[in-house]
Each structure stands twice: as C-alpha cells, then as structure tokens.
C-alpha cells in the first residue's frame, strides 16, 4: 500500500470510530437518535470576560462569567448538537495558571471522558499553546478534546467568543477528531495542539500553524478536515497511541522545573546560572546560544539541554556528541512542556532524545 493510501486509510479509520452523534445533511446539522455527551470545562480568560462598554475590545476583566452562563446563552441552538455538562475549573486569566494547574486539569479531563464522549476546554489565549499541548501529551483517552477561547470579551460588540464556543462544541460532538489528540479551534479554523501558535495580540485570526497549515475548517455547511496529526496512524491500538506520560504515575507536586533561555546578540551567562541555581532540571534554548550562554550551559551538571529554533518554523539539528537534545521544529514553549514531562520520568539523555523524536516530532 502506498504512503498516500495508508494516510487515507488512517483518516478513514478516525472517521469510522466517530460513532453516531451528529450527522450532516444538506440543510446542515441535525440531531441523530442519541446525542453525544460533551463535557464543557471553563477556565475563564478573555472569552469569559466582561467590559464596562461594549466597545471595549482590549480593556476588560477576564474570567468573570461562569461557563454555564456562556453555554446557556447559546441555547436553544446548542441543544441540537449535544447533551452538555458544564463546570468551572477556574475563572482567571490564562497567565495566572501554573504547570501544577495543568496537571490537575488533565486529570479532570480524563475523569470526564470516562462518562462523556468528548470534552471542550474554554480558556484564555495567552497560554493556550502550552495548555493544549500539555493535554495532548497527557490525556490518554482517544476521545476528542477541543480547546477554544476568544480574542474579544463576551460582552463586546462582535465578540468572537460565542461562535468559537459553539463551533468547539460542534466539533467535539461530531467525533471527527477522534484519535487526533487535543485540537484547538478559533476563528472557524482547526489546529493540532502541537503546531498551534498565537501570532497577534489583538486580531481574531491570531492562531496559525506556521509551516503545516490548518487541520481543517468549520463552516455553516459542515466540518471540513484536510489532514490529521501523525499519531492517528496508531488509532487502532490505543496503548500505542498514548504517550508514556501517564499522570497517574506522576506526582503533580513534583513536576520538574524547566526554563527557556532566549538567545540574542551578546546574551550573558547569568540567566543560565541563575536558572540552575534556582533548581531548573532542564533548559530549552530558543535559538543558537551566544558564546557565554553556551559556556555556562555546558558547565552544568545533570541539567538537560534542548535546542529549538527562535524563528517560528524550521527544525534544529544538533550534534549528539555535545550533550544537547534537538527539539526538531517544536516551538520553545512546546519543547519546555515536553521536556518537563520527560524529566518527570527519566533524566537519561538518550531516552530524552528518543522521546523528543518519537513524540515531539511524529511523522507519517
């Protein structure tokens, strides 16, 4: 079978396991006999924000509206898509959450997927890249997990929040992203968590994937998927599909510290030595280290070092002899998430390199 045929077969398999929840007809979506059960979890952020005036697009209070209120404002239309449960994990700006919070969130998502068909997480966009990738690496269920948010508060004129939340629930209920891992959807676009990146501080089209393009789009006529993450090739074998990062075997209070060191002209050594002194178990370089940075890094003992690009796209190749792991084309923030999960399991250099290759840079 050719590579193209295998990819087509894998995508067909992902669609086949979707089950009967929402069926697409010529007039759009209509409820099937049994609606899918979707857990909607709110974390606050801009999408749940309110402002003093409806024209305040950038000055507002994030996370002031509970997720149940957001969902209820989408009725009755949302009731045709799925049976919904709602709960607030928190009501904060996304920058106020920590890695420990992501651990708790991932465990919560797993529990909800025990008795739901899919999950939607509504959160702020500032740390959505890291949150979605953490879920992608740690949630072991093959059921759809969809992350969404907004660039304008719910109370603003023309807010993108209602459409984004509606489409996220619609995508989750369709089961079309079964075995895709965690996906992100905003602005009618669908992205894999690994590649999704925020590019603009204010525009509603802020999220993109740089080199590889969207997974698909959500239009009135239906959900269109044009590609799939490489992990779907293991859909028929959930044990192989899952990553080694089973949070039930990890202590959430003991996840290692990993810092990012940005390189620039004449970058000094102090941030490296300070990170190590503060207890960092790993350092991710965003760009080629400056001479002082490189000297300080190579002098460290027992600290994992990963090299990534600082340009938004393109892979990094590293000579393994120097003791630095290549992050491939992972963004620095994504490489940090993967490295801290790996270091919770092992500090072995060869294993770190192998898992960056196998899970951080999966290919068909």
Image (cartoon, grey):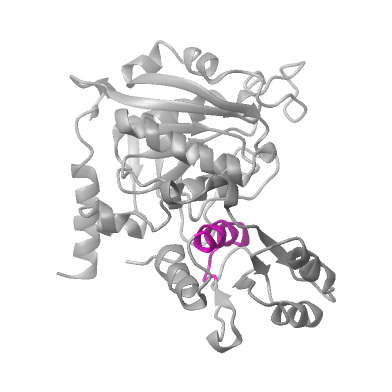
The answer to which quarter of the image holds residue 166 is top left
Q: Which is the main secondary structure of the residues drawn in magenta?
A: helix
Residue 317 seen in this snapshot: yes
Tell me residue 5's x, y (percent).
19, 63
Q: Is residue 89 left or right of residue 272?
A: left
Quadrant including the C terminus: bottom left
Residue 186 seen in this snapshot: no
Quadrant including the N terminus: bottom left
Q: Measuring 74% from the left and 21% from the top, which residue is drawn there?
A: 55
Against 283, is 156 above or below? above
Against 316, is 151 above or below? above
Tell me residue 194's x, y (percent).
48, 55
Which residue extends farthest bottom?
321
What count of labels does the image hold? Answer: 0
Residue 324 colored in magenta in the image: no
Q: Is residue 189 left or right of residue 90?
A: left
Which residue extends farthest top?
76
Tell me residue 286's x, y (percent).
67, 67
Q: Is residue 255 left or right of residue 272?
A: left
Against 55, is 109 above or below? below
* Start-end of magenta stretch: 327-344
Tell me residue 4's x, y (percent).
23, 65
Report the front residue among 225 and 254.
254
Q: Measuring 46% from the left and 60% from the top, which residue is drawn there?
A: 212
Residue 332 colored in magenta in the image: yes
Report the front residue among 313 and 62.
62
Against 266, is 21 above or below? above
Which residue extends farthest left?
1
Q: Measuring 41% from the left and 51% from the top, which residue is drawn there?
A: 246
């Amino acid at each position: 079978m050719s590579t193209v045929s295998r990819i087509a077969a894998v995508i067909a398999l992902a669609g086949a396991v979707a089950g009967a929840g929402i069926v697409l007809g010529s007039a759009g979506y209509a409820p099937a006999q049994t609606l899918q059960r979707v857990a909607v979890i709110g974390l606050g952020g801009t999408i749940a924000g309110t402002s003093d005036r409806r024209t305040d697009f950038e000055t507002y209070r994030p996370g002031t509206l509970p997720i149940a209120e957001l969902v209820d404002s989408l009725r009755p239309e949302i009731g045709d898509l799925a049976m919904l449960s709602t709960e607030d994990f928190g009501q904060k700006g996304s920058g106020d959450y920590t890695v420990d919070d992501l651990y708790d969130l991932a465990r919560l998502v797993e529990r909800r997927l025990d008795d739901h068909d899919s999950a939607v997480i509504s959160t702020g966009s500032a740390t959505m890249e890291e949150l979605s990738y953490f879920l992608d690496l740690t949630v072991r269920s093959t059921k759809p997990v969809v992350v969404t948010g907004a660039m304008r508060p719910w109370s603003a004129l023309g807010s993108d929040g209602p459409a984004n939340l509606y489409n996220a629930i619609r995508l989750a209920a369709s089961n079309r992203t079964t075995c895709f891992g965690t996906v992100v959807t905003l602005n009618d676009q669908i992205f894999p968590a690994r590649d999704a990146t925020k590019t603009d501080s204010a525009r509603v089209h802020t999220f993109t994937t740089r080199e590889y393009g969207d997974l698909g789009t959500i239009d009135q006529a239906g959900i269109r998927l044009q590609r799939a993450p490489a992990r779907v090739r293991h859909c028929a074998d959930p044990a192989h599909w899952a990553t080694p990062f089973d949070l039930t075997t990890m202590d959430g209070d003991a996840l290692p510290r990993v810092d990012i060191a940005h390189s620039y002209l004449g970058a000094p050594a102090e941030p490296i030595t300070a990170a190590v002194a503060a207890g960092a178990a790993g350092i991710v370089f965003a760009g080629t280290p400056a001479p002082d940075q490189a000297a300080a890094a190579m002098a460290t003992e027992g600290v994992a070092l990963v090299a990534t690009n600082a340009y938004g796209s393109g892979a990094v190749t590293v000579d393994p002899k120097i003791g630095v792991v290549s992050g491939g084309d992972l963004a620095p923030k994504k490489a940090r998430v993967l490295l801290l999960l790996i270091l919770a399991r092992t500090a072995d250099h060869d294993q770190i390199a192998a898992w960056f290759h196998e899970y951080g840079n999966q290919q068909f």
